[in-house]
Image (cartoon, helix red, strand yellow):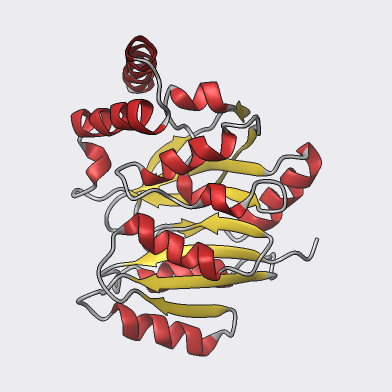
């Protein structure tokens, strides 16, 4: 396979971690990629790091928001400029294993799926492995996704020849990636999981996902406002989401 993978990386005050993230892309065994670094008006040295990395590899492209816009619109900026058949996401403080793209694209072809994801390991804020891993289910469809998102965003790869690019654009809401992935699967597409640890996710002490009540509220708003579920159905899926979240921590 020689199709280009467009990797979307929002950047905001990421000077301390961005180089490690980008170097993990540059080390990929699969070499047909472009990396779009989109700066969301950083106040640190992120732009200098971006431009230094771009100068070292012609596959790295720097984009700049005119004003601070948040992660959803920043990712959308990258998606608009992407030229590859495949869209992948990687945040500016996470990393990929060297065989991440090669193994995943091979898997996509094997299972004939337009949307795939993999398992991850967890590292702390300083980049040290915690010994924890997050393993993924074999398959996620729309109804499964309504119960909560088990697909790590930093591992997702989407084939835009089979899932229209407009479905991938992220609404400017909390849980923007979850909202977009619901949109991708709503018409019957099925996402397939490769249960191999191929990426590292950095947990920050300031991570918004750490506030469970707040994320449950965001989940509710997506179920009701975006997906248009009735009150009883939204309540059912929210309860299932809460149950699965508690079960995962037991």
| Occupied quadrant, residue 228 | top left
Q: Residue 70's x, y, as percent?
A: 29, 59
Quarter the N terminus occupies: bottom right
Q: How many marks?
A: 0
Give the residue displayed 43% in from the left and 77% down from the top.
63
Of residues 28 and 129, the one nearer the viewer is 28
Give the residue displayed 73% in from the left and 44% down from the top.
107
Of residues 35 and 203, the one nearer the viewer is 35
Q: Residue 34's x, y, as percent?
A: 60, 72
Of residues 58 and 170, the one nearer the viewer is 170
| Occupied quadrant, residue 65 | bottom left
Q: Residue 185's x, y, as percent?
A: 58, 34
| For residue 168, side relative to residue 14 (left or right) | right
Q: Is residue 129 visible?
A: yes
Give the residue displayed 45% in from the left and 80% down from the top.
62
Give the residue displayed 45% in from the left and 60% down from the top.
76
Q: Is residue 99 visible?
A: no
Q: Residue 130's x, y, as percent?
A: 35, 44
């Amino acid at each position: 396979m020689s199709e280009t993978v467009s990797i979307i990386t929002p950047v905001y005050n990421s000077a301390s971690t961005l180089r490690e993230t980008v170097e993990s892309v540059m080390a990929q065994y699969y070499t047909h990629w472009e990396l779009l670094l989109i700066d969301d008006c950083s106040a640190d040295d992120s732009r200098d790091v971006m431009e230094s990395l771009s100068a070292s590899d012609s596959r790295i492209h720097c984009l700049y928001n005119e004003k601070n816009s948040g992660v959803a619109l920043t990712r959308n900026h990258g998606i608009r400029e992407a030229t590859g058949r495949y869209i992948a996401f990687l945040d500016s403080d996470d990393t990929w294993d060297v065989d991440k793209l090669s193994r995943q694209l091979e898997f996509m072809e094997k299972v004939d799926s337009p949307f795939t994801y993999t398992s991850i390991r967890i590292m702390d804020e300083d980049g040290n492995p915690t010994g924890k891993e997050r393993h993924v289910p074999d398959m996620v469809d729309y109804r499964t996704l309504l119960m909560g998102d088990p697909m790590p965003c930093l591992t997702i790869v989407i084939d835009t020849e089979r899932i229209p690019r407009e479905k991938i654009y992220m609404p400017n809401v909390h849980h923007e990636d979850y909202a977009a992935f619901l949109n991708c699967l709503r018409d019957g597409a099925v996402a397939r999981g490769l249960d191999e640890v191929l990426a590292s996710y950095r947990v920050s002490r300031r991570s918004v996902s750490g506030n469970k009540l707040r994320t449950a509220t965001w989940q509710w708003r997506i179920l009701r406002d975006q997906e248009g579920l009735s009150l009883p159905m939204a309540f059912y899926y929210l309860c299932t989401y809460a149950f699965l979240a508690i079960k995962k921590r037991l």
